Image (tube, rainbow, N blue to C red):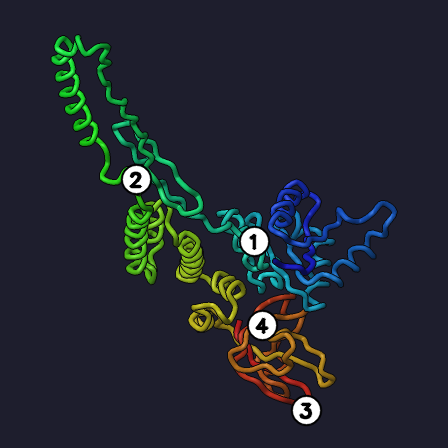
């Protein structure tokens, strides 16, 4: 369970969504801070700044309203400057500020449930609990009317067979020796009937009436083991599959599948991989390639390919000053903001306006200005030159 404080930055126009969003995270164990906690009479700016300084993670709810909110953008800038972990949540399709594009966001626009599960996993919060298997044991019924009693202490099912009490044999009453002859025939008949009756009862009794037969739970366990073995056998076949349909079919086939959590995790991972594949394979412009690079960074599966493909679109070249002799940087290096010396192949983005020259410093073409940069505009470094303590670079754009 996470214990760090999480700050949520959002636009007032998204307050209704924010309430449900924060409730969901709190139910998963998140320690949240939002402006709803500012007490009456409290200084708004001071409270926000104190919360931002003390929190460990900043969640930014991205919408058309929030990217146009100065307060939200100020909070994001402060968090980045303080090296806080920033997690953007995309609530609707909109144009992100370029600096924010460099941070991998979680997309809620397609499937909010999957997005929320990914966010909880990122924050090490509780996700959907693992399903417990439940197995039903068929009741064993005896046609003769026996009842089944399950003893919790031994987990044995014992058949209790009602005992039938045998009626005592009837003996004729001899009233008088004189009447013996008259009663001899009924006595013979009665003894014969008793003999037949007792033999019939003995044949109906179990072999050992003192210790009635036991229906053991091993019979049930054997069926259970067979079910699990079948589930496990198929799982061994598909567990390394790269097809989402294989895992979905497995879950639908085995209602009480013991691999439900593992299967769902793999499905989510495959969906993320598939989404990355689609974003790269459908990137047909420099902007789409840059969006892929900014979202997945250098750890992206196709980062090198996307970087090389930019050469097909970055066909204009120029020379520009990367840093001053006093160490001031005019550009930031993608995913290496603390590095002050650029390298060939780096992506850099401008902090403001700088002139691109047709030739390097002190050359005949230096006076020809080919382009003026704008804030957050991206360039690819093709050549690095040092002049004193300053650095000049040849870039493509």
Mark-to-mark CA distance, 4 and 2: 77 Å
- Specify the farthest residue to the front: 178
* Quarter of the rendering containing residue 53: bottom right
Tell me which residue sits at (46%, 70%) in the image. 303
Tell me which residue sits at (42%, 60%) in the image. 273
* Quarter of the rendering containing residue 386: bottom right
Q: Secondary structure at mark 4?
A: loop
Q: Position of residue 99 (x, y in %)?
A: 62, 64
Of labels 4 and 1, the one closer to you: 1
In primary-sequence order, the first of circles 4 and 3 is 4
Asked if labels 2 and 4 touch by Cβ distance under 8 angstroms, the answer is no
On residue 388, which mark appears?
A: 3
On residue 126, which mark appears?
A: 1
Mark-to-mark CA distance, 3 and 2: 101 Å
* Quarter of the rendering containing residue 370: bottom right
On residue 212, which mark appears?
A: 2
Q: Is residue 228 left or right of residue 326?
A: left
Q: Position of residue 373 (x, y in %)?
A: 63, 69
């Amino acid at each position: 369970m996470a214990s760090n404080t999480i700050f949520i930055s959002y636009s007032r126009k998204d307050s209704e969504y924010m309430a449900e969003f924060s409730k969901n995270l709190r139910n998963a164990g998140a320690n949240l801070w939002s402006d709803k906690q500012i007490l009456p009479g409290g200084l708004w700016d001071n409270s926000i700044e104190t919360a931002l300084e003390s929190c460990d993670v900043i969640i930014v709810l991205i919408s058309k309203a929030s990217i146009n909110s100065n307060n939200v953008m100020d909070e994001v800038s402060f968090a980045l400057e303080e090296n806080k972990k920033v997690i953007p949540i995309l609530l609707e399709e909109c144009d992100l500020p370029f600096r924010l594009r460099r941070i991998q966001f979680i997309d809620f626009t397609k499937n909010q449930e999957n997005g929320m599960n990914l966010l909880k996993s990122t924050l090490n919060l509780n996700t959907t609990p693992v399903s417990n298997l439940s197995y039903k044991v068929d009741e064993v019924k005896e046609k003769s009317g026996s009842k089944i009693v399950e003893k919790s202490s031994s987990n044995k099912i014992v058949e209790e067979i009602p005992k039938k009490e045998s009626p005592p044999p009837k003996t004729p009453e001899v009233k008088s020796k004189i009447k013996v002859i008259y009663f001899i025939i009924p006595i013979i008949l009665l003894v014969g009937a008793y003999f037949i009756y007792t033999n019939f009862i003995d044949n109906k009794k179990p072999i050992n009436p003192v210790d009635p037969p036991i229906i053991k739970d091993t019979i049930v366990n054997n069926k259970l083991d067979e079910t699990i073995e079948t589930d496990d056998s198929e799982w061994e076949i598909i567990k390394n599959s790269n097809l989402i349909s294989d895992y979905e079919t497995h879950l639908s086939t085995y209602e009480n599948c013991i691999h439900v959590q593992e299967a769902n995790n793999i499905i989510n991972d495959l969906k993320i991989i598939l989404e990355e594949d689609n974003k790269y394979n459908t990137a047909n412009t420099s902007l789409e390639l840059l969006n892929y690079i900014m979202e997945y960074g250098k750890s992206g599966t196709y980062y090198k390919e996307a970087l090389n493909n930019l050469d097909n679109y970055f066909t204009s070249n120029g020379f520009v000053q990367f840093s001053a002799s006093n160490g001031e940087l005019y550009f930031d290096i993608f995913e290496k903001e603390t590095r002050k010396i650029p390298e060939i192949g780096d992506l850099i983005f401008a902090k403001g306006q700088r002139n691109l020259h047709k030739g390097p410093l002190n050359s005949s073409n230096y006076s020809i200005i080919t382009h003026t940069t704008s804030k957050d505009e991206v360039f690819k470094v093709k050549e690095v030159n040092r002049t004193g303590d300053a650095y000049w670079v040849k870039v493509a754009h």
